[in-house]
Amino acid sequence: GQSLRAVLQHCATERPLPLPMHLRILIDALAGLHHAHELTDFDGNPLEVVHRDVSPHNIFVTYEGQTKVLDFGIAKATDSTQHTADGVIRGNVAYMAPEQVRGEKVDRRADIFSMGVMLWEAAAGRRFWDGMNDLAIINRLGGGDIPIDRDDLPEFALELGPVCRKAL
């Protein structure tokens, strides 16, 4: 298969990925994330796994049409003893939640934020932070400045606006 990023890049040269197909991929990725978020230890205690790097690079679409969430390499669980060095940002900034950029404790909502960015991009047909570099994105996110506006979505996708706003 291929990463969702590779699929989207290929489709950009041919024809856009149809929104219903794009939504199916995102829904399946959400189901995978939900499974990870709900994991428990042997005693039934929640592990509170957070992926922390959900992006089109880490969503894989198999040639059979299955969607997989990959690369839990920087994931955190409640009992995790790993610490990221101060001042080090790990992950794809363009899909990162504000609290993660600020170095605050994150929970499953950070992954939902990332999926919200991808949903907005699917609906709008363009990048959420279009034309901005990582430093500009970090500054905006750190200050809680998230540019979500219904007017940015095409008419056929307006119903997704409230869902995007809720996730973001």
Image (cartoon, rainbow, N blue to C red):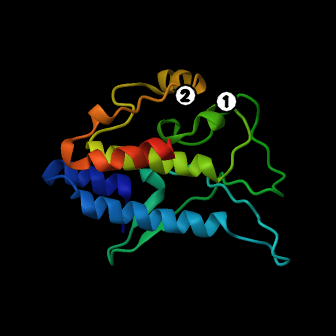
Q: Which residue is mark 2?
A: 141
Q: Is residue 57 left or right of residue 96?
A: left
Q: Amino acid at mark 1?
A: Arg
Picture coordinates of residue 147, whole percent (x, y) = 42, 28
Q: Is residue 31 visible?
A: yes
State whether residue 114 is above or below residue 147.
below
Determine the secondary structure under disc 1: loop
Whether residues under marks 2 and 1 lie with C-beta atoms below 8 angstroms apart, the answer is: yes
Q: Quadrant of residue 161?
A: top left
The residue located at (23%, 54%) in the rendering is: 10
Q: Amino acid at mark 2?
A: Leu
Nearest the eye: 70 or 102: 102
The residue located at (47%, 68%) in the rendering is: 68
Picture coordinates of residue 30, whole percent (x, y) = 49, 62
Picture coordinates of residue 157, whole percent (x, y) = 25, 48
Picture mark count = 2
Nearest the eye: 123 or 102: 123
Picture coordinates of residue 92, whole percent (x, y) = 52, 41
Q: Disc number at residue 7? A: none
Q: Is residue 2 visible?
A: no
Query: Who comes first in sequence, dot 2 or dot 1?
Result: 1
**Quarter of the N terminus within the rendering:** bottom left
The residue located at (75%, 57%) in the rendering is: 77
Q: Is residue 165 left or right of residue 12?
A: right
Residue furthest out toward the left: 14
Nearest the eye: 145 or 42: 145
Q: Is residue 94 left or right of residue 7?
A: right
The residue located at (75%, 71%) in the rendering is: 40
Determine the secondary structure under disc 2: helix
Q: Disc number at residue 102? A: 1
